[in-house]
């Protein structure tokens, strides 16, 4: 079983990089909320580590749940993947995810201060794994699946924000918290749509947004989302570091150029690859902004 799980994690969800990602996501929102509220004396301890682990654990659970949900489709279109290929068994993943959820729940009950927000996050995740009890309707509609599933990123952000506000006694209903709830939602939404945009010659049986709406309209939609995303980021870092604002805008300008190139000639590259590069740079700049403010103050 352990060998089979190792195969799954290696190909579908590399543990160490994704654990670091969970800590980074938690840390970015945590510090953005604190710094925009003028808090510069931090009380970092086991709770923050558990918060980052919860983000990692929750996203891993969603990954496994998606493999169960899409098993029949994957057997037809992605038979090389660990689960549909038979190299990993459903029982392996079921046992592992049960232990994972039990550990995550236990840690949050014992150490965290926002259990009700945690519970809401996992209830929503459970409903997602069950297609909100409307599998036939949602599974057949890509836009409906997006509308019902993608908000989970925002709910995860609210989990982090709630912990931060409770721990430091901050007001929950502020513009900063509102923007922070959106700041990692948009990158997730942009990536989710972009990975299902293809050049006409690359379309298969797999349903994509480009097949439903055309690659130009789909790309324009993502372009608009990208500029909405940069607006939230700029507003969050404006009072922290003006140099970062310039860097964020330059990165968005580069991404806009790539969107235009793809709409002119979709066979030039895969748009999701450019989106991933844009996102890595964008989020790295956010982290650098946080680090610079902590070390040097406002610039």
Image (cartoon, rainbow, N blue to C red):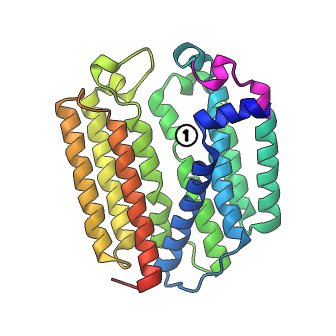
Seen in the picture, residue 201 relative to 170 is either above or below; the reply is above
- Is disc 1 surrounded by few (<14), some (14 to 19) or many (20+) residues within 10 Å? some
**Image quarter for residue 239?**
bottom left
Location of residue 233 in the rendering, given as x and y in whole percent from the top left corner? 37, 64
Instruction: Give the residue displayed 20% in from the left and 46% down from the top.
Output: 257
Q: Specify the quadrant that holds the C terminus.
A: bottom left
Location of residue 284 in the rendering, given as x and y in whole percent from the top left corner? 42, 61
Q: Is residue 83 magenta?
A: yes
Location of residue 293 in the rendering, given as x and y in whole percent from the top left corner? 43, 80
Q: Is residue 58 left or right of residue 268?
A: right
Residue farthest front in this picture: 3
Q: Is residue 146 magenta?
A: no
Instruction: Give the residue displayed 51% in from the left and 65% down from the top.
Output: 28
Task: Decide which of 71, 130 is in the foreground and name it.
Answer: 71
Q: Is residue 104 left or right of residue 64?
A: right
Instruction: Give the residue displayed 26% in from the left and 61% down from the top.
Output: 249
Q: State whether the magenta stretch is mostly helix, strand or loop.
A: helix
Seen in the picture, residue 212 relative to 99 is either above or below; the reply is above
Seen in the picture, residue 82 relative to 189 is either above or below; the reply is above
Q: Specify the quadrant that holds the N terminus.
A: top right
Please give the residue where the numbered disc 1 appears in the rendered image: 149
**Residue 173, can we see it?**
no
- How many labels sit on residues? 1
Task: Decide which of 279, 65 is in the foreground and name it.
Answer: 279
What SS does tag 1 mark?
Answer: helix
Location of residue 187 in the rendering, given as x and y in whole percent from the top left corner? 42, 50
Specify start and end residues of the magenta stretch as a single range. 80-94
């Amino acid at each position: 079983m352990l060998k089979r799980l190792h195969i799954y994690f290696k190909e579908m969800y590399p543990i160490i990089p994704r654990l670091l990602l969970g800590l980074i996501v938690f840390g970015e929102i945590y510090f953005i909320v604190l710094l925009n509220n003028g808090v510069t004396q931090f009380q970092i301890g086991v709770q923050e580590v558990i918060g980052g682990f919860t983000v990692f654990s929750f996203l891993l659970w969603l990954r496994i749940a998606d493999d169960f949900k899409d098993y029949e489709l994957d057997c037809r279109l992605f038979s090389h993947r660990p689960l549909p290929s038979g190299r990993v068994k459903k029982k392996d993943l079921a046992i592992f995810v049960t232990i994972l959820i039990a550990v995550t729940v236990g840690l949050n009950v014992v150490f965290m201060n926002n259990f009700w927000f945690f519970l809401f996050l996992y209830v929503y995740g459970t409903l997602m794994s069950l297609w909100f009890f409307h599998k036939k309707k949602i599974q057949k509609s890509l836009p409906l699946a997006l509308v019902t599933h993608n908000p989970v990123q925002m709910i995860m952000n609210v989990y982090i924000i709630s912990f931060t506000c409770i721990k430091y006694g901050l007001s929950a209903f502020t513009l900063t918290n509102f923007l922070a709830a959106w700041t990692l939602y948009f990158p997730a939404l942009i990536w989710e749509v972009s990975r299902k945009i293809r050049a006409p010659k690359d379309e298969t049986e797999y349903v994509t947004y480009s097949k439903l709406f055309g690659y130009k309209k789909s790309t324009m939609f993502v372009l608009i989302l990208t500029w909405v995303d940069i607006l939230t980021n700029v507003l969050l870092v404006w009072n922290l570091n003006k140099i970062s604002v310039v860097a964020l805008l330059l990165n968005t300008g580069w991404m806009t150029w790539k969107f235009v190139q793809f709409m002119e000639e979709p066979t030039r590259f895969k748009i999701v690859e450019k989106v991933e590069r844009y996102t890595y740079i964008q989020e790295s700049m956010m982290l650098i902004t946080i680090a610079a403010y902590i070390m040097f103050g406002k610039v």
